[in-house]
Amino acid sequence: MASDASPTLVDKEWITSSIHLPGFDPLEFRCVSAGGSEETGDTIWDVSLILLEHFHMHFHLLAGKRVLELGAGCGALGIIIAKYFRPCEVILSDYRPCIVENIQHNIVNNSVAELARAVTLDLLDVDGTELRTLDADVILASDLVWDKDLGDALFDKIKDLVSKPGSRLYVIALARNLDLMAAYTRRLELMAELPDGGIQFQRLSCSENPWFDLEAYLRPNTYFWEVSAADAVAASSSAVALPDATDAEDLCD
């Protein structure tokens, strides 16, 4: 009889991926070898590198902040932020316990265990109270809205995600489905227009400061939103660049 148990780390095959940030040492990440359309944690998506390019020019958005990454996969984005962007804490989340365990492996392997931790969080099941309890200043959703169920769950919980004063949600996704991206843009517009909508948003540039050598089609076909509470001050209007490896530690306590 087939087992209904969730897969564990010992059931997985692994590959190693690396990211080399210009001016910094390369980092390595253990990823699940692709095992089907419902797998997660099997690659480092290029849109997460576009998100890093934005924070490279707006270092102040992360420095000293508590960062929550939704759908962290192998954890590369959150681990790089913990390593080089001087947050006070990074919480990396995903919905499968075995993937969360692998994220923790990558956290330890990249020497950021003092700043980062992995937690199990399923956007389809989590309630607003639990999200608010995480007390995040910055929430990252990289390439989640390609899946309509996940996208709908994310947008249903936007007000909970940005309920903390001054908090911001960054949603970035490659436009695999233009109709879906247009629908989510319109949903943000409607929420911002409603008196009790409680949010504001702006669509950010994906070509502000190319830092990585990416395929030419990616940036023009990527949607990138910053969402915050209606009374928050826009955060991405001024640039404070990420310092190089020798100066980074001097910027934050």
Image (tube, rainbow, N blue to C red):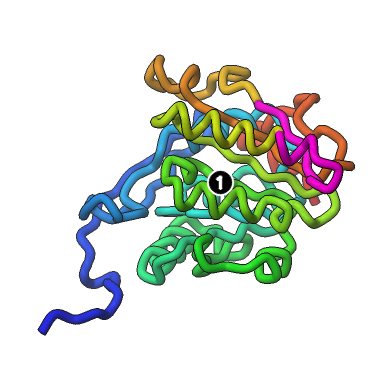
Tell me if 239 is positioned left or right of 105 in this view.
Answer: right
Tell me if 239 is positioned left or right of 106 in this view.
Answer: right
Vertical placement of 229 versus 224: above or below? below
Residue 224 picture location, percent across and down: 59, 31
Tell me if 235 is positioned left or right of 93 in this view.
Answer: right
Vertical placement of 174 versus 137: above or below? above
Mark 1 neighbour class, 10 Å CA radius: few under 14, some 14 to 19, many 20 or more = many
> Which region of the structure is painted magenta?
190-203
Vertical placement of 132 versus 34: above or below? below
Residue that numbered label 1 is attached to: 141
Q: Amino acid at mark 1?
A: Ala
- Asked if residue 247 shows in the view, the reply is no
**How many numbered dots are placed on residues in this image?**
1
Q: Quadrant of the N terminus?
A: bottom left
Identify the residue at horizontal 45%, vertical 26% (top origin).
178
Residue 154 picture location, percent across and down: 57, 51
